[in-house]
Image: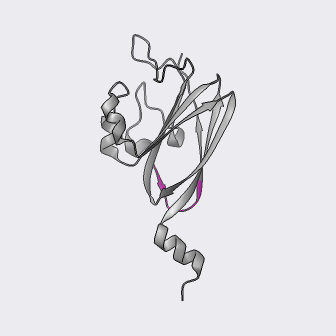
Amino acid sequence: NIDSKESKLFLTNEFTLNLEVAEILKPGNLFIAVWNSSVAFNDFNNKDVNAKANIFIGFKERVGLGIFKKTFKLPKGVYLISVYLDSNFNNKLDYNFLGIPKEQYGFSNNEIGNLRKPKFNEGSFELINDSSLKIRLRSIL
């Protein structure tokens, strides 16, 4: 006989993710994208608006300095979370002439490639129970 808590877990297969985004240096709009597909993430180009349809879940939150926290539910699976801070409120991540981000950004596992975004397998994590995840925003410039 399965108790109600186990039964609910078995039926929904959803878990709580407590996300913390730290080291926010300026106020702005924080864009959070939850990816569940390596193909969608690895092929994603921030400049291609149509590619944003491949994001599993997306959030836009107005934030101040310091830390931002958000809790949400996700089904069991493998995910990568990408975050960027739009500090000039133009709804995009700005780059310099070399293609380097001018605004803060981060990825799950705090994975940052050598002047490139990480591949899905480098920044992804497996969600198999209620979890917490901390992403530290980075800035190259």
Instruction: Specify start and end residues of the magenta stretch as a single range.
Output: 125-131
Is 122 located above or below residue 65 in the figure?
Answer: below
Tag count in the figure? Answer: 0
Residue 99 lies in quadrant: top left
The residue under the point 48% across, 32% down is 112
The residue lying furthest to the bottom in this view is 1
Residue 98, given in percent of the width and then of the height, sits at: 39, 13
Name the foreground residue: 67 vs 134. Answer: 67
Is 110 located above or below residue 125 in the figure?
Answer: above
Residue 81, given in percent of the width and then of the height, sits at: 48, 42
The residue lying furthest to the top in this view is 97
The residue under the point 57% across, 20% down is 87
Name the foreground residue: 82 vs 86. Answer: 86
Is residue 31 rendered magenta in the image?
A: no
The residue under the point 47% across, 20% down is 101
Residue 31, given in percent of the width and then of the height, sits at: 51, 33
Colouring rule applied to residues: one colour
Is 5 located above or below residue 37 in the figure?
Answer: below
Location of the N terminus (image quadrant): bottom right
The answer to whether 81 appears left or right of 138 in the picture is: left
The answer to whether 78 appears left or right of 28 in the picture is: left
The residue under the point 46% across, 60% down is 76
Location of the C terminus (image quadrant): top right
The answer to whether 68 appears left or right of 83 in the picture is: right
Residue 138, given in percent of the width and then of the height, sits at: 56, 27
